Image (cartoon, rainbow, N blue to C red):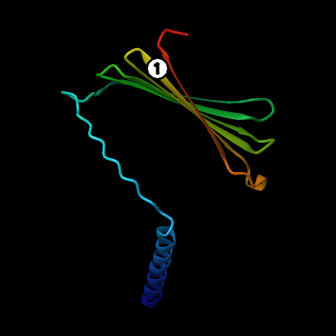
Amino acid sequence: MTRFLLAGAAALGMMTGVAMAQSSGHSSTTEETTTITPSVSPPWTTSGSITSARGATSDGDQTATSGSSSGDSSGTRTSTTITNTSYPLSGMITNTRTTTAISNGVATETVTTTYTYPASNLRAPEVKVATRTYAVGGK
């Protein structure tokens, strides 16, 4: 039994070494240094909430949504909503993540949508990202 364990460990080590050798020929490293000076006191979370919901349509499409929001002592308010929708007739699944951060009267909203197709489609997932910035209370 010990021979089998040692042989398995040796094989794992050799496979790991081979994978590292293969990936090391194609890697590059970029290093950047950023210095951040902290404020007098770091912000702390003052409030937060989490919600979730599910639904279905008559043709079988199913949706699940989850959201959370929080605020901190510096006045920054962040909310995130994640919606997953499955379409059984086509086999596609969409994942939409919307994050909105409001700080000093300016909101930055980022929407990331991932479209995942069934394996039989032989199509890689598609990711689309949209970002917008606007003044809170503005149009």
- The crowding category of the residue bearing disc 1, from other C-alpha atoms within 10 Å (few below 14, some 14 to 19, many at least 20), is some
Horizontal side of 36 relative to 124 (left or right) equals left
Residue 66 occupies quadrant: top right
Q: Is residue 62 above or below residue 47?
A: below
* Residue 50 visible in rendering: no
Quadrant containing the C terminus in the rendered view? top right
- Which amino acid type is marked by label 1? Ala
* Residue 5 visible in rendering: yes
Secondary element under disc 1, as helix, strand or loop, is strand
Residue under label 1: 107
Quadrant containing the N terminus in the rendered view? bottom left
User: Residue at image x 49%, y 82%?
Assistant: 11
Question: Could you say which is closer to the camera, residue 63 or residue 93?
Answer: 93
Q: Position of residue 79 (x, y in %)?
A: 47, 26
User: Residue at image x 26%, y 37%?
Assistant: 36
User: Residue at image x 44%, y 90%?
Assistant: 3
